[in-house]
Image (cartoon, rainbow, N blue to C red):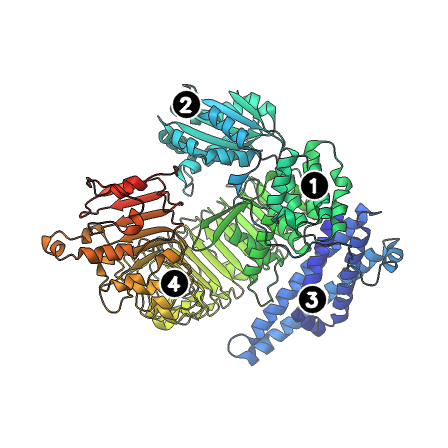
Amino acid sequence: MEVALVSTVLKVLGTKLAPLALKELSSKAGVARDIQELQDLVEEINNWLQTVGDKGRSSKWLKKLKEVVYDAEDLVHEFHIEAEKQDIEITGGKNTLVKYFITKPKATVTEFKIAHKIKKIKNRFDEIVKGRSDYSTIANSMPVDYPVQHTRKTIGEVPLYTIVDETTIFGRDQAKNQIISELIETDSQQKIVSVIGLGGSGKTTLAKLVFNDGNIIKHFEVVLWVHVSREFAVEKLVEKLFKAIAGDMSDHPPLQHVSRTISDKLVGKRFLAVLDDVWTEDRVEWEQFMVHLKSGAPGSSILLTTRSRKVAEAVDSSYAYNLPFLSKEDSWKVFQQCFGIALKALDPEFLQTGKEIVEKCGGVPLAIKVIAGVLHGIKGIEEWRSICDSNLLDVQDDEHRVFACLSLSFVHLPDHLKPCFLHCSIFPRGYVINRRHLISQWIAHGFVPTNQARQAEDVGIGYFDSLLKVGFLQDHVQIWSTRGEVTCKMHDLVHDLARQILRDEFVSEIETNKQIKRCRYLSLTSCTGKLDNKLCGKVRALYVCGRELEFDKTMNKQCCVRTIILKYITDDSLPLFVSKFEYLGYLEISDVNCEALPEALSRCWNLQALHVLNCSRLAVVPESIGKLKKLRTLELNGVSSIKSLPQSIGDCDNLRRLYLEECRGIEDIPNSLGKLENLRILSIVDCVSLQKLPPSDSFGKLLNLQTITFNLCYNLRNLPQCMTSLIHLESVDLGYCFQLVELPEGMGNLRNLKVLNLKKCKKLRGLPAGCGKLTRLQQLSLFVIGDSAKHARISELGNLDKLDGELQIKNIRYVKDPGDTDKVCLKKKNGIRKLSLDWYSRWEDQPNDMEEELSLNMEKELHLLDSLEPPSKIEKLRIRGYRGSQLPRWMAKQSDSCGPADDTHIVMQRNPSEFSHLTELVLDNLPNLEHLGELVELATGKDP
């Protein structure tokens, strides 16, 4: 794997040597020839490495090569940034000629220094390449057309890979049922059930199936999930338990408060606590932790997953289940499911080779999934055979066999994904990785190209999905559907693989590690030492978590660090520390005790992403933020003390994504927002004090906006009219804007709109006329029928053929022409799964006088409901405030009995035969309905 790592680093360097901007500056500096020769050397040695593989390699020689490649990449990174700085300093802004004469001498000095470094690096590279005794012999024997490989047989085009659904795991039904039976068995004692199995055998997946089972949810009043991992620190575990119960640790309450809250939440309640991946065999530590779970009611249970029987014995398990390996048949089923192609589509030769490879995986789900993901991207039969015949898989020990499968998968991973995967080693085990943050980190490291027609973030999503497909990332969860917010995790074995590949390039304990000079990835959790020059010399990615950490105030300027993540830092020298990283590309500050971001932040000239999370005391973003000309993403989340952003935010010319979330003190948005011509995403969520947006002459200039989110902005009443001129908008999320009264007229101009979320906009009087032109719309949670000519008629829904998910139609009583509902064609909108038909907008709008009731046209009422027949695949249906006396034909088919209606609120949770997917039917406040017999007769079928 050492060769694979060196090859990966060489590919990254080769990519960074190619851009035109670098060549232009190198020409000025007089090193264009050196750059070109360096690029040729990189390509040549990488081709040679791929040819010889592990044959006759010298570990010492590879390390030297790797070091010089890393140094070369750092230098190229510095060269890129200096080129960009010169360009902006000379051509940006006014007085260009004056700026040229001021900056030119400085630029010349910089060019001279970098030119000297490049020549030195090139000479080092030359010496190392020539130092390989058999280099010339092997290089000269390489075929002319290398690295093209010709194979006798290939797989044709295959369909896209489908992420595995954990509810359809093969071969685990018996295990799941057995464990559930043990957990819910009536017993007055608290019981501990342990699942014991090899790493990657599916313990966590099995625990999730149990955790989400309907019998478990019904039986236990409280269910909790805590990921434990190797470090069994009682205080940390108690904090995790508190977070699972209370959902928030941002205020860092003392341990006594945490313990009391846990006890109060669990007292007298039957609970299930899943403790995933437990390693400790120390009874004393276990008993100290269990004290916090003693207040639950009799019959409470703990489900524990572990790799060791000794752990199960140490915790006095009442039942221990040894998770078996999958059978050959189930292993093959898992492979087919993960491979993502039908068995019939595989050639017999691929089929046989695939079965042999799967058999070598030893029935371990993780190994099968990862191998399947890698094979999916390999089309040549020779490569399949090469993997099958690999010595890596000829291992007798089960645990080593799993790791061998993972190692082989890394070797065959596409080159552009390898550095992205290795970067994930920076996170602690069990860490919940935010996709958006991770992609920003990849961009900062230069792993994702930024000079293509596609947005770098979109390319990054493709890389992320590819790592999911091969199983190197897992537990993919979409936590916010309208905004596409996604998280994932790494399996512990995959996490171990990444760190093992990096070897001494990864450091997690600064006190004992002697190889700190080679460290590129520094991940410090619970750190109590001092972060100084010695530690950060060549570090590229830095993760620090610890309240006792100190920063060295005399630290020199650091040029190598690209990404920094700081959590729970209390040291007051943080501002000075951050300012030392001039070439920093990504900065994340989370749960840090500071009142203002430092003015010196502007020295981080290369900063492209700034994320400030859960810093509740922070109240000031400095004016100097406008100097961050490369900033692409700014996120303030959980920064409740901040009241406004500085006007200088408009000077961040390159800003593409602005997220203000849970900033509950923020009152307005600066007018300078309109200067951000490159802004693509504006997300303002749970900013409850926000009452107004920038005026139209500012807001209307954001012509490249694709996504607008004003979710949970309770006091927002109106939107600027100019919003309808933002023709590139694809998503508008206004959910839970309780005071929102009207949408701007002309919404129909937004022809690219795919999402319009109006959920819980209770005061909305109606949708503006012309909404039927939004023919690309896929999500429309609410359609309100207004009582004036400026509002859309219900017939406009007929043009929206692509709707799916949830739809609520309100104020059906305002339909004047019954023929309008005939044009809606709900029954043809097969994507809708949840439908609500409301005759009124709010409960209090319903009539109290007899005059309106007497004027009702029962025939019209019946026609309205009859023509709003839902699609056949509807899953949940609610009819509320219907004023007719009869139910429509589509609710009464096959019914020949009737009876008096003795209630106006009926909830049925069975499947009527006419709608085979229906799991819930709610009839609420139907005061004039004369009989319900039809529904009673139709309520047959399976339980949901």
Disc 4 + disc 1, Cβ < 8 Å = no
Q: Position of residue 202 (x, y in %)?
A: 58, 35
- Depth order, front residue of 604/309: 309
Mark 3: secondary structure? loop
Above or below, 462 relative to 352: below
Residue lying at 51% horizontally and 25% vertically, measured from the top left = 193
Mark 2: secondary structure? loop
Q: Amino acid at mark 1?
A: Lys
Mark-to-mark CA distance, 1 and 2: 45 Å
Residue 607 visible in the shown view = no
Residue 536 marker: none
Mark 4: secondary structure? loop
Q: Which residue is mark 3?
A: 18
Residue lying at 48% horizontally and 56% vertically, measured from the top left = 598
Disc 4 + disc 2, Cβ < 8 Å = no
Residue 76 visible in the shown view = yes
Mark-to-mark CA distance, 2 and 3: 65 Å
Q: Position of residue 406 (x, y in %)?
A: 67, 42
Disc 2 + disc 3, Cβ < 8 Å = no
Residue 299 marker: 2
Mark-to-mark CA distance, 3 and 4: 47 Å
Nearest-to-viewer mark from 4 and 2? 4
Disc 3: CA contacts within 10 A as few (<14), some (14-19) or many (>=20): few
Q: Which residue is mark 1?
A: 355
Disc 1 + disc 3, Cβ < 8 Å = no
Above or below, 165 relative to 782: above
Mark 1: secondary structure? helix
Q: Which residue is mark 4?
A: 800
| Residue 547 as seen in the image, left or right of residue 919 | right
Mark-to-mark CA distance, 1 and 3: 42 Å
Nearest-to-viewer mark from 1 and 3? 1
Disc 2: CA contacts within 10 A as few (<14), some (14-19) or many (>=20): many
